[in-house]
Amino acid sequence: MNLTQETQNQTTTLHAQGRLDFEAAGHFQQELEKSVASAATDGNALLIDCGSLEYVSSAGLRVFLVAARAAKAANVPFAVYALTPAVKEVFDVSGFARIIDVLGDRAGALEKVGRHA
Amino acid sequence: MISLTEELTLLAVEDDGRIAYTAGSPNFAMALIGACIVDLNKAGRVDADLAGLNVLSAEPTGLAAQDRVLEVIAAGPQQTTERWVLELQGDSPDLVRMTLGQLQKRGILHQAEKRFLWALRARRYPIDDGGKEQKEAKLRILGALLSDGLPTPDDSMLIGLAVAGGLLEAFLSKSEVARLAERIAEIGGLDLVVRAVEAAIRADAEVRAHAIMLSIH
């Protein structure tokens, strides 16, 4: 799994690419925790771009909950967007879509976290 | 830290050491198997997705119940988590026994024979640690349900499996459970394995209902 990060207009975006399974979950969690901490320090919002995320397993899914919880605790506006159909199905079935802000595209995600493109 | 399987089993132990009658139900059996699978997932032995349950490593974890489940899954066909939960439910009495054994090893409870009506004997599992682990599990469930924050993955799975296994009513009144229903639905079981347990319970109930209908006609 590949992760790249960019920050602009007080918004940190993590672009996730590939497969988020048990093997990748540990690294993904570490990176997300770092991003939440730095977003909190800098007063940024945090978005996860899932447009190139092909697969999420049970182990991978939990990392999103850990991140959303950490973001909420740190008052960091948080949303995920552009889920592929396979990943969206996992979010829907597990119930994550009810507790995490899941948006169709970047513009919607930016609006949700109170930022502008 | 005790495993999810141990926590769930501990919730089924009543104050006087009796095992709650719900622990004999198919729903509890399937929730317990789900807990074993979650523990195996957290230990890196299996991983679940919507298509199936994948074995990553068949190396034992050292926990008897979880290792029994791992052994069966590793030797079996590739199939969904729901299918595994349904197929393994017959093993649940052994899995409960193994988990109670594990809790005894940890000094959390002990086994005692109690006589009643002079001759009949009943096995009890009085809790030894001052009820610390059991209280902690109950407090975590209540804390997550009564707050408006996001739960930890562990708390969410514990709530989901406790609800699926019918254990919430062991320490909450029916009216409290009803009052918390919306919150339970929101944060309980945010996990593919727990959702598979819920699906297995629905499928099992349908089969049983169908069998009853057939017996009537």
Image (spheres, coloured by chain):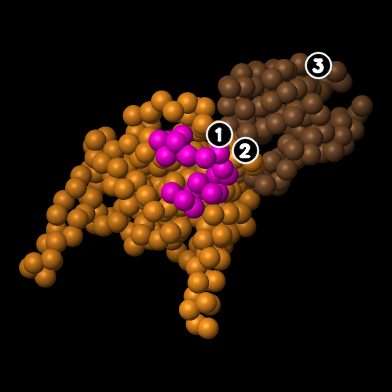
Task: Using the rendered image of the protein, determine whether residue A62 is visible from the camera's viewpoint.
Answer: no
What stretch of residues is rendered in magenta?
B70-88
Residue type at mark 1 is: Asn
Q: Is residue B199 above or below residue B68?
A: below
Q: Which residue is mark 3?
A: A6
Please give the residue where the numbered disc 1 appears in the rendered image. B54
Label 2: which secondary element: loop
Dots 1 and 2: beta carbons under 8 Å?
Answer: yes
Predominant SS of the magenta segment: helix
Foreground label between 1 and 2:
1
Residue B198 at x, y percent in the picture: 55, 54
> Label 2: few (<14), some or many (≥20) within 10 Å?
many
Residue tagged 2: B49
* Whether marks 3 and 2 lie on the same chain: no
Chain of the residue on which disc 3 is drawn: A
Q: Amino acid at mark 3?
A: Glu
Residue reaching furthest to the right: A117
Residue at left offset 90%, top offset 29%: A116
User: Which residue is located at x 28 percent, y 47 percent?
Assistant: B97
- Colour chain B appears in: orange
Do the CB atoms of the residues marked 3 and 1 lie less than 8 Å apart? no
Q: Who's brown, chain-wise? A: A
